[in-house]
Amino acid sequence: MKQFFHKILSLTMAFVVLFSTMSFTVDMHFCGDTLVDFSLISEAKSCGMEKAQPIKRCENPEMTSTSCCTDQLLVKEGKDDLKISFDTLSFEQQTFIAAFTYSYINLFEGTELDEVPFVAYPPPFVIRDVQVLHQTFLI
């Protein structure tokens, strides 16, 4: 059971490291306030409602048209440096780590095999079995 728990824990920690170092992008296409398409791998597809920007000409300088569609790109950068220096921790964190490590190591100190605490006390003499003699049994 203990080995199974360790395997599950190690796999979970491996996935945490993998997903914390992985970067990804999400490309989204909105038409007005409505999400039309999103993509994790490639560029999001357009809804086809984009209007070509008319060329600003001398005869009609105020003629501009804006599209109702917008594209958003969300980028999540992964961590490149996973090694945390012990010097960057605060004094309270260093104290906690030192105390936790010391107490965790001392949890697994074994006792000597020759140490028996009740060796000085002899076992009681059993002359007859009292429960069988009086027919009193715990059920």
Image (spheres, rainbow, N blue to C red):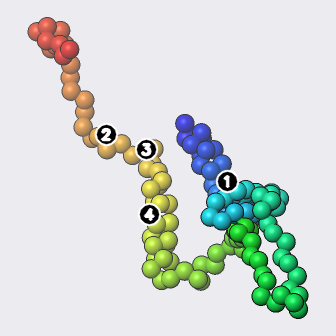
Q: Nearer the viewer, mark 2 or mark 4?
A: 4
Q: Earlier in the sequence, mark 1 or mark 2?
A: 1
At label 3, which amino acid type do we have?
Asp
Q: Which mark is residue 114?
A: 3
Q: Position of residue 50 (x, y in %)?
A: 79, 66
Q: Nearer the viewer, residue 53 or 47?
A: 53
Mark 3 nearby-residue class (10 Å; few <14, some 14–19, many ≥20)? few
Q: Which mark is residue 103?
A: 4
- Nearer to the camera, 13 or 124: 13
**Secondary structure at numbered mark 2:** loop
Q: Secondary structure at mark 1?
A: helix
Question: Given this view, does label 4 or label 3 mark the residue nearer the observer?
Answer: 4
Cα–Cα span, label 1 and label 2: 51 Å
Disc number lying in front (3 or 1): 1
Measured in 3D between alpha carbons, the distance from the residue under mark 3 to the one under mark 2, in whole angstroms, is 10 Å
Mark 2 lies on residue: 119
Examine the rendered structure and indicate whether residue 35 appears above or below residue 99: above
Q: Secondary structure at mark 4?
A: helix
Taking the spot 61% from the left edge, 44% from the top edge, the residue there is 8
| Residue on which disc 1 sits | 15
The image shows residue 133 at horizontal and vertical percentages of 14, 8
The N terminus appears in which quarter of the rendering? top right
Q: Could you tell which of marks 3 and 2 lies nearer the N-terminus?
A: 3
First in residue order: circle 2 vs circle 4 = 4
- First of labels 1, 4 by sequence position: 1
The circle drawn on residue 33 is none
